Amino acid sequence: MNAGSSIVLIGSIAGSVGNAGYGTYSASKAAVRSYARTWSKELAGRGIRVNTLNPGPTDTPLFAEASDDACRHLTSLIPMNRLGPPEEVANAALFLASSESSYITGAELLIDGGMIA
C-alpha cells in the first residue's frame, strides 16, 4: 500500500458489549478493534491509516427474516428508533477511506443510532 492509503476494518458494536450466546462472535469483533489500534501504530510510519467501522443493527436481508416482534424489540433499544440503512454504513466507510479523514487513525466509528452510548 502507498503512503496516504487507508484501511477500514469492519467490526461491530458486538465487540464492545456482551451478548449472551455470541461470545465467539463478540470476541472476534473485539479482536478487529485491537488489530486496528495496533496496525495504526505499525503502519503510521508508512503513511497508512487504519480505522474500524462498528455498525449496530443494520437493515439488511438478515432482518427481513426476523419476526416483527424481534425487529420491534431491537429497534426499541436504539435511541434513534430505527435500524441503520446499509447506505449510511457505506457512507461512513467512504468517509474513513477518504482524505476527509486524513488525521484519523486507530479510531472506532460507531454507527449504531446511539445504541451503546
Image: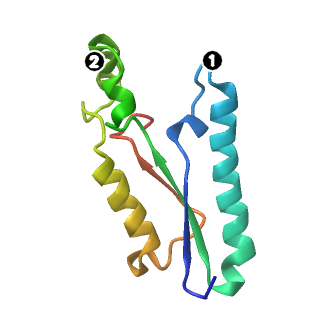
Q: Say what secondary structure mark 1 lies in.
A: loop
Q: Which mark is residue 107?
A: none
Q: Residue at x 61, y 17 (%)?
A: 20
Residue that label 1 marks = 21
- In the rendered image, residue 78, in percent from the top left (x then y), is placed at 33, 30
Compared across the picture, whether 97 is left or right of 84 comes to right
**Disc 2 crowd, CA 10 A, few/some/many (<14, 14-19, 20+):** few
Q: Residue at x 27, y 18 (%)?
A: 72
Residue that label 2 marks = 72
Q: Which amino acid type is marked by label 1? A: Gly
Q: Residue at x 70, y 46 (%)?
A: 31
Q: Which amino acid type is marked by label 2? A: Arg
User: Which callout, 2 or 1, points at the residue further toward the start of the chain?
Assistant: 1
**Viewer-nearest residue: 94 or 18:** 94
Task: Examine the rendered structure and indicate whether residue 112 appears above or below residue 49.
Answer: above
Quadrant placement of the C terminus: top left
- In the rendered image, residue 5, in percent from the top left (x then y), is placed at 55, 80
Q: Is residue 16 visible?
A: no
- In the rendered image, residue 84, in percent from the top left (x then y), is placed at 30, 41
Q: Residue at x 31, y 26 (%)?
A: 64
Task: Examine the rendered structure and indicate whether residue 59 appears above or below residue 43.
Answer: above
- In the rendered image, residue 42, in percent from the top left (x then y), is placed at 75, 73
Compared across the picture, whether 54 is left or right of 72 comes to right
Compared across the picture, whether 57 is left or right of 9 comes to left
Q: Say what secondary structure mark 2 lies in.
A: helix
Q: How is the image coloured?
A: rainbow
Q: CA distance from mark 2 to mark 1?
A: 21 Å
Pointer 2 with pointer 1, Cβ within 8 A: no
